[in-house]
Image (tube, coloured by chain):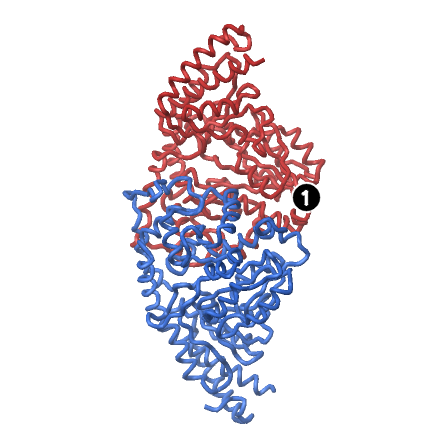
Chain colours: A blue, B red
């Protein structure tokens, strides 16, 4: 394969005509594909249907603590759910609080509390002239949306294959007291599927922030969402790492079962130090009488323990793996050597990230849409929706069927080629 | 019956000795009664156990909109749940948003949003020097806890048999721009069981607040929680009343199924004008990917429609009614004419409110505790936990069994008498 940039105008022109013809053919198929969000497929959701039978009208709904899960009581989660999710999140059972159905909501709440009440007695962020967050990019659009909603200034931090650029993180955090947080998806990151290296995690734990109320927002959304049984990323546990580094309070860790059982009907949790959890409980006491304990019980009894959950995740992997490989195999087969894009083959998570030639992402997504395939908007993986290089595209292979995914991958590759050729011809 | 205040010291002394003897006997029984919170009894919870069988692994979990309730999607509630709860809340289906499991959480969120983002483009409350709320007293402790948590100054408004003292509400609201809200439980109020009269509701709707961002926080928690089939309070619907009075945006209305199905595993909702809901949706888009649709579907299919819900509430009433009457009958029988306390016999809701002689509430609650009966702390029904007259006590008859309730009522009456006699002897 010769790199496109080395082709003559005539060669490019001829490729363009060929791709345009193929594109018209694809368009004529009237495809309707959605690769826009990290939604589990119906086949994956079916894996959890047994959960609907776990509790019946004959069930005893008393939890281990002797409390009737149907009634008020127990603010921070029944012990069965705490045990399951603390195992899942690799933290001591006393360092976890069970929330409602969405970890996004827990993150929103956490930022909101920092705004109105500050962190451990420090000035509420809403009373400061300027609050800034570091945002590893590409990253998760809904993280950036939260900080934008609260008027927090976002600073891009480039991702490397080992995680965020830690030289930059360390420098900024130690110099600027206005920097109060950083968004992290440390394992099988959204969208690149990168897991932070040991060195990265340890450097996070050892940060020396100028702001005493700086917090790492550690969204371990894909902690057990492997694609392979025999090739899994390992992540150093951040709470323990921070404790050892003398920074026990520096991190909030989030997770949920949204992509394990049912999105929207799962169980979310936060893990943090005793001091942080004490502050969170003080808020919760005012905020709610308690979250849905019946659903917590349903989850705990369905999985029994963390082994049951790992077993369950293997079934998800069996469904997801071929779809991921349909994309990465085709990218490799069709684009290797052309120098019009790069990608990482992930070992878990929900996304594949594709970096097109500069200035091509928006055009590629638009082309895909023209042929009936919705993708995440180009730019969405950057704060304010602005990808300075207009290069990154997030591919979400979970929702379509495998057949659709193969079709989608072909269309995507075609659009990448076509737009790249057009771009090179413009120059 | 002669009023205690007309008795001689000798008569009082003799009563005191008699009551002390009775109290020691009661104490010796080693009672363990909890009348502290408005918790449904196990018998009431059993009424909803059928809900556990509504969805099984064989069920179709697609809602009427064609969306799979197991997956992401639909931010503000599935149409089945909207229909059910809008009927329950007596508002148009388009003026409702379905939330998670707790209306308290919705109220907290609403105040929090006003703090950080303001109301319809106006200055966020956290940027103002002073924010005040009006608090009809006695009222709901958890309302007051929210405003206290956010540093909002609370002003007591006395309740009358027709609702809050509207002369005072109108005067304060029209004069003071710092007054941004008022907490209301308009039907079968917590704790008095008072329903606002037509005049009260219409005066609320016609308020002319100095603050354009003044909002009525209308917590219609007991809208369909009647005790009697043939003697029910009727409440004018506030959204429509505000609309007609030219104040469409002035009210947020809250409700939930917490005391209809399972507390903590129910469905909550907010109803408001289009403009208000638009602002709330803007927040929700950032805050969550959506609430628990499976639980919404479970509720909708269990009740089928509002008639099913009313039928269900009759079963609750059949359980609650004798317990309420065990208290009010005994109060009437034992205390009438003694002039040591007053109460209202409620037609619905979860509480009976008792006003003891000034300076006696704390002592009565302490006496009850001494004999093994936990009541809501005296003062809890007032902002900051301060009842200026130390007079109001909230009785929650729902949780104990009928037999326990009869025992509890006897003990309560005894403690009232004993403490009152002691008080009169002190003077």
Give the image location of residue B144, x and y in percent.
57, 37
**Residue at point 50% right, 60% down?**
A242
A176 w.r.t. B417: above or below: below
**Residue at point 34% right, 34% down?**
B43
Image quarter of the C terminus of chain A? bottom right
**Residue at point 41% right, 63% down?**
A223
A160 w.r.t. B203: above or below: below
**Residue at point 48% right, 19% down?**
B416
Answer with left or right where residue A374 lies relative to residue B156.
left
Identify which residue, B244 or A402, lies in the foreground. Answer: A402
State the SS at label 1.
loop
Chain name for mark 1: B
Answer with left or right where residue B61 lies relative to residue B172.
left
Residue A328 occupies quadrant: bottom left
Give the image location of residue B156, x and y in percent.
62, 31
Query: Which residue corresponds to mark 1?
Result: B212
Residue B330 occupies quadrant: top left
Give the image location of residue A170, x and y in percent.
58, 67
Q: Residue furthest left?
A: A58
Q: Residue furthest right?
A: B175
Identify which residue, B377 or A250, lies in the foreground. Answer: A250
Give the image location of residue B231, x and y in percent.
45, 25
Identify which residue, A373 or B120, lies in the foreground. Answer: B120
Identify which residue, A368 or B131, lies in the foreground. Answer: B131
A363 w.r.t. B177: above or below: below
Image quarter of the N terminus of chain A? bottom left
């Amino acid at each position: 394969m010769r790199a496109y940039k080395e082709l003559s105008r005539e060669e490019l022109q001829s490729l363009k005509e060929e791709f345009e013809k193929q594109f018209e053919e694809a368009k004529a198929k009237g495809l309707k594909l959605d690769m826009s969000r990290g939604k589990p497929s119906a086949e994956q959701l079916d894996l959890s249907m047994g959960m609907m039978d776990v509790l019946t009208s004959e069930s005893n709904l008393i939890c281990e603590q002797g409390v009737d899960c149907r009634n008020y009581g127990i603010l921070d989660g029944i012990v069965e759910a705490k045990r399951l999710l603390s195992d899942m999140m690799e933290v001591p059972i006393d360092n976890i609080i069970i929330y409602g159905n969405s970890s996004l909501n827990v993150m929103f709440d956490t930022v909101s509390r920092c705004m109105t009440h500050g962190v451990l007695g420090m000035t509420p962020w809403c009373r400061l002239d300027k609050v800034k967050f570091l945002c590893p990019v590409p990253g998760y659009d809904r993280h950036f949306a939260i900080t934008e909603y609260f008027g927090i200034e976002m600073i891009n931090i480039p991702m490397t294959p080992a995680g965020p650029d830690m030289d930059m993180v360390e420098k900024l955090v130690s110099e600027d007291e206005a920097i109060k947080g950083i968004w992290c998806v440390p394992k099988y990151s959204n969208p690149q599927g990168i897991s932070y290296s040991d060195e990265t995690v340890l450097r996070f734990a050892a940060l020396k922030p100028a702001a005493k109320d700086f917090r790492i927002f550690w969204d371990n959304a894909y902690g057990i969402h492997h694609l392979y049984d025999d090739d899994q990323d390992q992540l150093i546990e951040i709470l323990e790492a921070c404790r050892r580094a003398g920074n026990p309070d520096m991190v909030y860790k989030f997770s949920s079962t949204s992509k394990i059982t049912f999105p929207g009907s799962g169980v979310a949790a936060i893990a943090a130090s005793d001091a942080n959890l004490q502050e969170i409980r003080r808020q919760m006491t005012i905020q709610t009488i308690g979250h849905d304990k019946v659903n917590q019980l349903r989850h705990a009894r369905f999985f029994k323990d963390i082994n049951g959950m790992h077993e369950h995740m293997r079934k998800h992997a069996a469904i997801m793996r071929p779809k991921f490989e349909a994309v990465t195999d085709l990218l490799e087969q069709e684009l290797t050597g052309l120098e019009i894009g790069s990608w990482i083959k992930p070992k878990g998570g929900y996304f594949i990230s594709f970096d097109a030639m500069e200035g091509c992402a928006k055009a590629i997504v638009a082309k895909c849409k023209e042929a009936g395939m919705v993708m995440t908007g180009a730019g969405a993986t950057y704060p304010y929706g602005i990808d300075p290089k207009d290069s990154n595209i997030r591919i979400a292979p979970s929702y379509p069927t495998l057949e659709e995914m193969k079709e989608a991958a072909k269309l995507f590759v075609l659009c990448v080629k076509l737009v790249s050729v057009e771009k090179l011809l413009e120059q």
